[in-house]
Image (cartoon, rainbow, N blue to C red):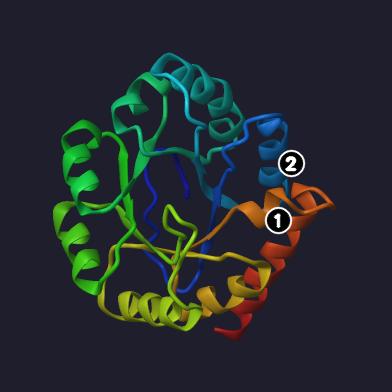
Amino acid sequence: MASRGTIAEPMRPAPRLYLMTPQDTARLADKLAQALDAADVAAVLVRLPPTDERNHVNQAKALAPAVQDKGVAFILDGHPDLAARAGADGAHLTGIDALSDALATLKPARIAGCGGLETKHDAMLAAEAGADYVMFGEPDAAGLRPSFDAILERVAWWAEVFAIPCVGFAASLDEVEALAQAGADFVAVGDFVFADERGCAAAMADVARRLAVAEVVA
């Protein structure tokens, strides 16, 4: 992502990273700094822990500089009504209804991304409604996701047919390269990066190497 406020990149296949944070915000700013120094990241999706509105805004404002000062888009997971107050570059919405409800609040100044798209029809509806990107493969609220083969098929179909960027969610390091080769514009990584015993920097460096291999193969 070349600048804040946009997530679209016109060229394929040259996927960039989309980093999703854990809900535990302890030392998160430090961990984000390490991760962002180790790899080229387009956007960070911040998943705020359950609390009241004021605390959400304060938490987001505290984290934003660690992301935006590096030229990376700062996106809230949900909370489109707080994006402006928190200084976020946009919000990620789950499902068509949530996207539709948020568009008037976010557009045109901020990013409106959409995940939780169970069918191809849902993904097309999101694009038609004005989503800036669609995400495939992320777990649902129960932690469930489609088979990885189904996710790859969905990413490849989207990349072949549509210009709006898609984000492919990688649940592990082993999924990164395959998503990139399938045509994802962005590869989302999250919990496995922050849970890596070596630290976020080492994990992100591994992810970046997998993307580099995928680009050479492509």
Q: Residue 67, percent across and down?
A: 57, 35
Residue 108 visible to an observer of this rendering: no
> Which of the two labelled residues, at mark 1 and mark 2, occupies the earlier sequence position?
2
Mark 1: amino acid = Met
Q: Secondary structure at mark 1?
A: helix
The image shows residue 201 at horizontal and vertical percentages of 77, 49
Residue 119 placement, left or right of 183: left
Determine which quarter of the picture holds residue 37.
Answer: top right
What residue is drawn where x is 67% and y is 63%?
208
Q: Nearer the viewer, residue 146 or 114?
A: 146
Per the image, the residue denoted by label 1 is: 204
Residue 158 seen in the current view = yes
Q: Amino acid under label 2?
A: Gln
Task: Tell whether 176 sits left or right of 56.
Answer: right
Badge 2 local density, few (<14 within 10 Å), some, or many (20+)?
Answer: some
Number of disc labels = 2
- Mark 1, other Cα within 10 Å: few <14 / some 14–19 / many ≥20: many
| Among the 4 quarters of the image, the one containing residue 133 | bottom left
User: SS at mark 2?
Assistant: helix
Q: Residue furthest front?
A: 142
Residue 147 x %, y %: 47, 78
Q: Do tag 1 and tag 2 residues touch (Cβ < 8 Å)?
A: yes
Quadrant location, the C terminus: bottom right
Residue on which the image places disc 2:
34
In the figure, 206 relative to 71: above or below? below
Q: Residue at x 42, y 22 (%)?
A: 86
User: Is 181 above or below relative to 193?
Assistant: below
Residue 117 is left or right of residue 50, and the answer is left
Cα separation, mark 1 vs mark 2, equals 9 Å
Q: Percent from the top left, x then y, of residue 189? A: 58, 57
